[in-house]
Image: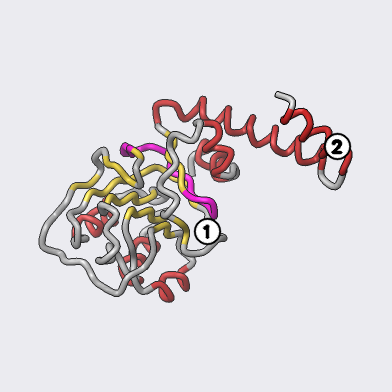
Amino acid sequence: MESIIKEFFSIPTTCISDAMDGLNNLHPGIKPLKEEYKAAGRAYTVKIPVGENLSVLEAISKAKPGDILVVDAKSDQYSAIAGDFVVGMAQTLGIGGLVVDGVIRDIIGIKALNFPVFSRGTTVAASGKTKKGEVNVPISCGGVSVHPGDIIVGDADGVVVIPQTAEQDILVNSIEKMKKDETRENSISGNPEAIRKHLAQILSK
């Protein structure tokens, strides 16, 4: 794993979001299947027609270990872009996670894999394999533009996209925000008087 991705992995998405003024958060409906899931890696993008998943399989075969598959499924919540068999193949090939603006199925089997999946939910319907989409192209996922190579970070609060062109600056600002939050928490936690002073400062502005 690249050092910058390791650093982003250790930062809450809330701090990363704040460092980007909330501009690159995926739709809040895209959540992890388990709250403990955390993922960080470079985006390998997939754009598919509604009800199809052939290009998801193509992406799994071409993505590098550690990459996060980011799938633009047009927010479709009827047909699953993958089930436990497909997700299991991605995991075996070293893919770092799956983020989909759509749904998956076989939720019990996928949870058993402990592979980080972020989606709009689950369904029972399968997708077809007749029409190909596109892979490794700019897409829109959850209302956010995603380019191949952008850094994706997901945790219990949601998913953020870090543009590759500004990743170093965003990392610095994210670390600064995280440290500021930690300092604030340590200074007032369990101290009623400190909390009152903190609230008074905010309300006086």
Give the spatial CA distance, label 2 vs label 1: 34 Å
Q: In this view, does 98 lie to the left or right of 56?
A: right
Name above or below for residue 153 compared with residue 31: above
Amino acid carrying label 1: it is Tyr
Foreground residue, 69 or 156?
156
Q: Position of residue 170 (x, y in %)?
A: 51, 29
Q: Which mark is residue 10?
A: none
The residue at the far front in this view is: 204
Q: In which quarter of the image is the C terminus?
A: top right
Residue 117, quarter of picture:
bottom left
> Which residue bears the numbered disc 2?
194
Q: What element carries label 1?
A: loop
Residue in the image at 36% along x and 74% along y = 106
Magenta stretch contains residue 175 = no
Residue count near mark 2 (Cα–Cα under 10 Å), binned few <14, some 14–19, many ≥20: few
Amino acid carrying label 2: it is Ala
Magenta stretch contains residue 152 = yes
Foreground residue, 67 or 98?
98
Q: Position of residue 105 (x, y in %)?
A: 34, 70
Which span is picked out in magenta? 145-158
Residue 78, quarter of picture:
bottom left
Q: Is residue 87 left or right of residue 113?
A: left
Residue count near mark 1 (Cα–Cα under 10 Å), binned few <14, some 14–19, many ≥20: some
Foreground residue, 79 or 200?
200
Residue in the image at 53% along x and 51% along y = 157
Q: In this view, does 10 lie to the left or right of 141?
A: right
Q: Position of residue 88 (x, y in %)?
A: 37, 67
Q: What element carries label 2?
A: helix
Residue in the image at 19% along x and 47% along y = 134
N-terminal of the pair, mark 2 or mark 1, is: 1
> Which residue bears the numbered disc 1?
37
